[in-house]
Image (tube, rainbow, N blue to C red):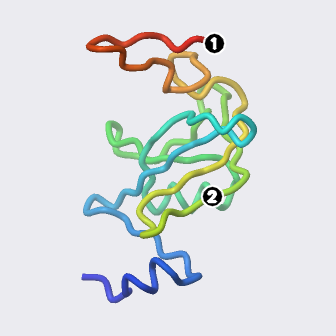
Amino acid sequence: MSSISAAERERGTAFLPRFDAQGLIIGIAVDSGTKEVLMVAFMDAEALEKTRETGLAHFHSRSRGKLWLKGETSGHFLRVQEIRVDCDQDALVMLVHPEGPACHTGAPSCFYRKLDGEVLAPLAG
């Protein structure tokens, strides 16, 4: 049990990220210009530290069980402009400048489809 009070976490000025039982926090990358949601991934303490240290978005790969720098193989880095923290500090929104497509499929955003009834339909644009 954490010794940090809800009031301290929710209303205080200290950055007190609340990682889940697996040591992860949600990281949402949003294009700083268009405000489009680009991707959602998990971050552990190491990924958060590297992101803050380098200004490039780092995440924790659950499938590989290790740190990964977004763009390390594609060159499509996400340059972090600002990190916003939600009320109980268990999710982060990173306003980023994308250097190419954010999605591994080559789409600008991982959110390139919408639910249309029972099927996925591509977004116009």
Vertical relation: 71 (above or below) 22: above
Point out the frontmost of discs 1 and 2: 1
Label drawn at residue 125: 1
Tell me how far mark 1 sits from mark 2, CA to CA. 28 Å
- Quarter of the image with the C terminus is top right
Vertical relation: 90 (above or below) 74: below
Query: In the image, what residue occupies the spot 53% across and 84% down?
Result: 12
Secondary structure beneath label 1:
loop
Mark 2: few, some, or many residues within 10 Å (few <14, many ≥20)? some
The residue that label 2 is drawn on is 83
Judge left or right: residue 43 versus residue 12. left
Vertical relation: 75 (above or below) 46: above
| In the foreground, 72 or 32 | 32
Question: x%, y% of residue 55?
Answer: 70, 53
| In the foreground, 47 or 98 | 98
Vertical relation: 119 (above or below) 78: above
Judge left or right: residue 33 versus residue 57. right
Query: In the image, what residue occupies the spot 57% across and 42% down?
Result: 29
Query: In the image, what residue occupies the spot 67% across and 61% down?
Result: 53
> Given contact means CB atoms under 8 Å apart, are the residues at marks 1 and 2 in contact?
no
Amino acid on which disc 1 is placed: Gly
Q: Would you identify the image quadrant in which residue 108 lies? A: top right
- Quarter of the image with the N terminus is bottom left
Secondary structure beneath label 2:
strand
Question: x%, y% of residue 48?
Answer: 53, 59
Query: In the image, what residue occupies the spot 46% across and 63% down?
Result: 45
Mark 1: few, some, or many residues within 10 Å (few <14, many ≥20)? few
Amino acid on which disc 2 is placed: Ile
Count of picture labels: 2
